[in-house]
Amino acid sequence: MKILDNALGVHAKALSARSERLEVLARNIANADTPNFKARDFDFKQVMREVQDEAMVTTQAGHLSQGESGPVGLKYRTPFNTAFDGNTVELTVEQAKYGQSAGEYQATLNFLEQRVSGIRKALRGE
C-alpha cells in the first residue's frame, strides 16, 4: 500500500480532505434553520500541512510537535450577521463556499485520474 501512496502523491489525501469539507459545508446548509447551530468550516491548508508533517521522517519522536487533538482543520466560522436565534449559518455564503469547494474537489479528482492513467500506461509498457 505504501507504493500506491507514493505513486498517487498528495492527491489522494487532498481528495479525502476536500470530500470532508464538502460534508461539513453540506451539514451547515442542512442546518441553516436550526436554532443555535454554529457554522463550521474546514481549513484545507492546515490539513495539508499536517499531511506534510506526517510525511517527514524524523530521527526522534519529539522533533515534531504533536499538534492539537480533535478534528484537524475543523473550525467555527465567524458570521457577517448573526441570526436572532443564535444560528451562524449564512445560506448564501455556505452555498458559495460549497460551489467553490465542489470545483476544487473536481480539479483534485482530475489530477488523481491523470496520475492513475499514467500508472496504467507505465504498467502496460506504453
Image (tube, rainbow, N blue to C red):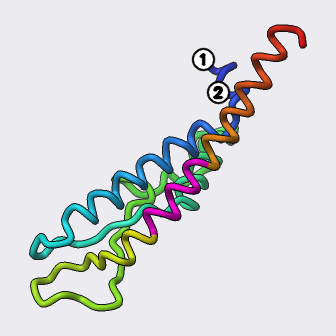
Q: Secondary structure at mark 2?
A: helix
Closest to the observer: 96 or 83? 96
> Can you give x and y, in whole percent of width and height, for residue 25 in the image?
35, 61
In terms of secondary structure, what is the magenta stretch mainly?
helix
Q: Is residue 60 left or right of residue 98?
A: right
Q: CA distance from mark 2 to mark 1?
A: 6 Å
Quadrant, the C terminus: top right
Asked if one can make out residue 112 in the rendered structure from this viewpoint, the answer is: yes
Q: Which residue corresponds to mark 1? A: 1
What type is the residue that disc 1 sits on?
Met
Q: Would you identify the image quadrant in which residue 5 lies?
A: top right
Which residue is pictured at 10% across the width and 84% down the height? 85
Q: Residue at x 80, y 10 (%)?
A: 123
User: Taking 99 as reference, is 60 above or below it?
Assistant: above
Asked which quadrant contains residue 80, the reply is bottom left
Q: Please, what is the three-letter code of the amino acid marked with disc 2?
A: Asp
Q: Position of 106 compared to 82: left or right?
A: right
Q: Nearer the viewer, residue 12 or 102?
A: 102
Q: Which residues are magenta?
A: 97-106
Characterize the local packing of mark 2: few (<14), some (14-19) or many (20 or more) Cα atoms within 10 angstroms. few
Q: Are marks 2 and 1 in contact (CB under 8 Å)?
A: yes
Residue 51 or residue 17, whichever sits in front: 17
Mark 2 lies on residue: 5
- Residue 73 place in picture, x, y as percent: 45, 59
Which residue occupies the extreme right position in the image? 126
Q: Nearer the viewer, residue 98 or 69?
A: 98
Residue placed at 64% from the left, 49% from the top?
107
